[in-house]
Image (cartoon, helix red, strand yellow):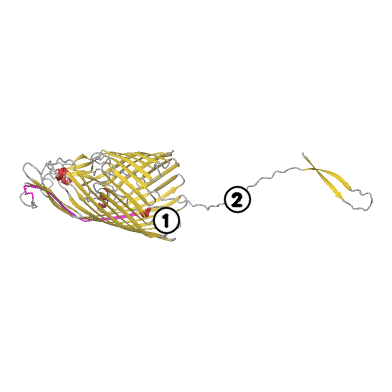
Amino acid sequence: MPSIIKPYTLLAALVALNASGQSLSKEITVDKDVVPQEREASRMVLTPKLVLPAIQQKSLRWSDRGVAAPVSPTVATLPPAAYASSITPSPYRGYVMAGYFPAFQLGVSAGYKLIKTDNSDLNVWMQYDGSSVKRKAPFNSGKKIGYYLPDKGKTTYNTQDVGVGVGGSHTFAGVGTLSGRVAYDLSSFNLPTLISKGFNQNVNRFDIDLGWQAQAGAFDYSVNLGYDYFHLSKVKDESITTNDFADNTRRATILDLSSRNEKTLSASFSGRYAISEFWHVGADIDFTDTDRSAGENIFEVVSGTWPDDSENFNGPYISHEGLKYGLDDVGYNITEMHPYLRWKNDNLIVKAGVGIQIAGGDCGSNRVRPDLRVDWTPSASFAIWGQLNDRRVNMQTLGDLYDRNRYVGRDCNAGPMLDKLHVEGGIVIGPFAGASIELWGSYGRVSSYYTPAVISLPQGNVGSLNSGVSESLFSPYFTIGQYMVIDNFTDVSYGAAFNYDYRDIASLRISWEGAPQEFDRGNINSLDRARSVFAATLGVHPINPLDISLGYTVRSGRCLYGIKPDYPGLFNPFEYRKYSLGTAASLDLGATWRFSDRFNVWGTVENLLNRDWQIVYGIPNKGVTGLVGVSYRF
């Protein structure tokens, strides 16, 4: 033990008057043991301590997964006006986009927020898309009977599409949110045929949507109402072609097509109650009613020897053939109810319920079937999902068919496509170092599937279908724009995809999807009945203001089926034939340069290699399409 010695000296000065003058002093030494003690250090609190409140985890509604197989577009269009749909509030009130591409393709889109507050918004928008493209008609030799077109066998496609709308919402604090939308769309376009320049027609469409969303404690719900009016204009067309036949005959085409009107009313309710953190009970109810007007169509092809300036087709003719038929008015409605019980934890979601379909009008019988959906995510790099049924009815209205392809479906009296069975599932592996793999497949059976068709007619007079046995010269005219219904269609598709993201510099996706190609088996999402669809997209962000996208899509084995009456014999079955539409291979390029947060320049070009194929039978694709333009936010 260490020892510390400290001297203490006591000094005393005494003032004495004695003569000796002696001072007094004494030295004292004290020994003491001192033991050092180490105290625990404590950090000084120099910064404030942040205490966060407990967070209540919310779960978003999950939606059905699907892999669409879109048909190649007929013309490049600008994105829909969706200014108000951004999750991140925008500091700008308006936007405008405009693009042009030769020979003539023009697109303009604009929108503005009239009201912009924390609780309310009111938006207006407009969009215009126009194009004029000339292409060589399929099967055209310039002189072949039944396939003749003027202008050296070329046909011109003109389209003009205009849309305007207004929409908004208001949130009542502590109560709910009311939203609404009103939109009007006008489309004007021509429908070329295999033996004439075709005819022009207009589509008028008017939509109203209202919605209410609210939450009361553990119960949240939404109510939506919708009305859609679809009008296809009347067509009255008489034209005469200048054919260079050996007998100097000429051909006249006469069309008298009734207008079509369709009104669709829809209402839906979706509600969910949280029993606990893991259990929910809910129900989805949908009602749709569609009414379609009646009509009558007359197609005629007349051959004669009229003078070049003649417009009188009622004179003597060499041959006269065609078709006259009526279209009945159609009305049908579907009520769907899907009550369910849902359970979830951190890795598993199970939704089980019952699907009930109540049919009214001209659309079949009622159905009751089980609904099941399972999503399992055991780790952040693996997920598997599957569902049994749980898919809504496809109403197949004229508006739906027009949205799929404007050149098909004018004379279709389609009804709803009801699922008899639907099974779908998939696996997601990854991401690992930015890479992931997807696998999926589906199988089902539907009551009635409407698909584009080729319908060949025998020779005969107007109003007659069975007065001859040979294929009519008029048939190629009638084939364009026709649908046929296939009952008990088997819906099958399967596919895989590879994804890779390299930081925020590049992203790659390569996918393949296949489907059988039989008369009554295929992919209902594929209008062109493609047997194989390969797609690769690459997005590159090399420097901050520049984005580049490159895509290549190949749709092979494209076809449609045709019906040809097999005469003579009234009760003979129909004969089905397959018609190739050609492989659709499109190389696409897009780029955007952002000069500022407000202003950028962009461009898109589709089908850079200018490949030829048919969109549907007799309608060629439009070659190289695209838009190059600017966008500005203000």
Q: Which residue is mark 1?
A: 220
- State the extent of the magenta-drawn residues as a range: 286-308
* Prevailing secondary structure class for the magenta stretch in the rendered image: strand
User: x%, y% of residue 303?
Assistant: 8, 47
Query: Which of the numbered marks, if any, corresponds to residue 46?
Result: 2
Q: Quadrant of the C terminus?
A: bottom left
> Does residue 288 show up magenta in the picture?
yes
Q: Is residue 93 above or below residue 481?
A: below
> Does residue 53 show up magenta in the picture?
no
Check the image and name the residue furthest to the right: 19
The Cα–Cα distance between marks 2 and 1, rounded to whole angstroms, is 46 Å
User: x%, y% of residue 332?
Assistant: 26, 54
Figure disc tally: 2
Q: Is residue 268 above or below residue 541?
A: below
Q: Is residue 295 left or right of residue 87?
A: left
Counting residues from the start of the chain, the first of labels 2 and 1 encountered is 2
